[in-house]
Amino acid sequence: MRPVVLITGGSAGIGAACARIAANQGFDIALNFRTDTTGAEAVATDCRASGATVILCPGDVADPEAIARVFAQVDQEFGRLDALINNAGVVDATAKVTDFDHARLRRMFDINVIGAILVAKEAVIRMRAQGQGGVIVNISSAAARLGSGNQYADYAASKAAIDCFTKGLSDEVAADNIRVMAVRPGLIETELHAKGGEPGRADRLAHMVPMKRKGSAEEVAQAVVWLLSSDASYITGSTLDVTGGR
């Protein structure tokens, strides 16, 4: 029986790359997305070509009722959950802290922090009930270390919260054989930069990376899916940088 992984924010970017690699590594996929049905269906087609069973689970992780619906789908279609890639997240337009307003911060933390915590909660409940453990990988960001002043200090703060949550949750559930890690991508070529109003950001800042290049979503996804595997069986509570040395 193939293990089941739920991937939030899986219609594009790092989430989509994780889905394709996980399917190739023998996982069945519950693919969550908010509105990009076309992107999610394309990812699902690729995963099915690798032999995976895939269900599409639309829902905004900022909405607790939508989270409940996603997990109800997983329960109904698979009856189990072995892994979670907690990837859904947003960034906003570049701005200084003095330009932030409450609505911007509310959206950022509802999705990047509160939503991620509630998704992890539901995953843990199911993994404990199954009695065989599981794996959770939270997607953080190098911004959690760098602060992203004059750009995305709110996004950086939300990802620093994810780092702290990763360690706290890992300590709570380690005795249940549930491993919890975070991966911090660096300057990665994804649609996230365009959504923040800077589609050329990765190219513009690549010179700041010690390796002198941007990374790919696939390079991040390879690390994430490795953490799901038995090869990483003694790793929990850790945060792995995939940043080209930055």
Image (tube, rainbow, N blue to C red):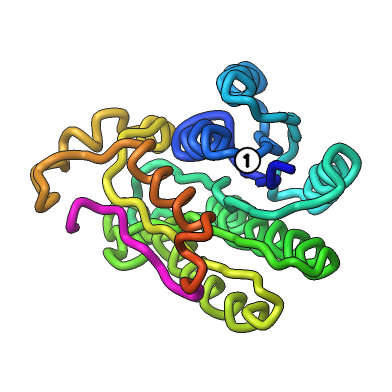
Q: Nearer the viewer, residue 39 or 49?
A: 49
Q: Quadrant of the C terminus?
A: bottom left
Q: In the displayed structure, does residue 156 sit left or right of residue 60? A: left
> In the visual, does 198 lie left or right of 25?
left
Give the residue type that dot 1 points to. Answer: Phe
Give the image location of residue 103, x and y in percent.
59, 52
Q: Is residue 13 magenta?
A: no
Would residue 22 be seen by someone viewing this image from the given angle? yes
Is residue 86 placed above or below 53 in the rendered structure?
Answer: below
Residue at the disc numbered 1: 27
Quarter residue 102 falls in: bottom right
Left-right relation of 31 to 207 = right
Outermost residue toward the front in this view: 1
Residue 98 in view in this figure: no
Start and end of the magenta stretch? 236-246
Count the labels in the image: 1
Local secondary structure at mark 1: loop
Q: Is residue 237 magenta?
A: yes
Identify the image quadrant of the N terminus.
Answer: top right
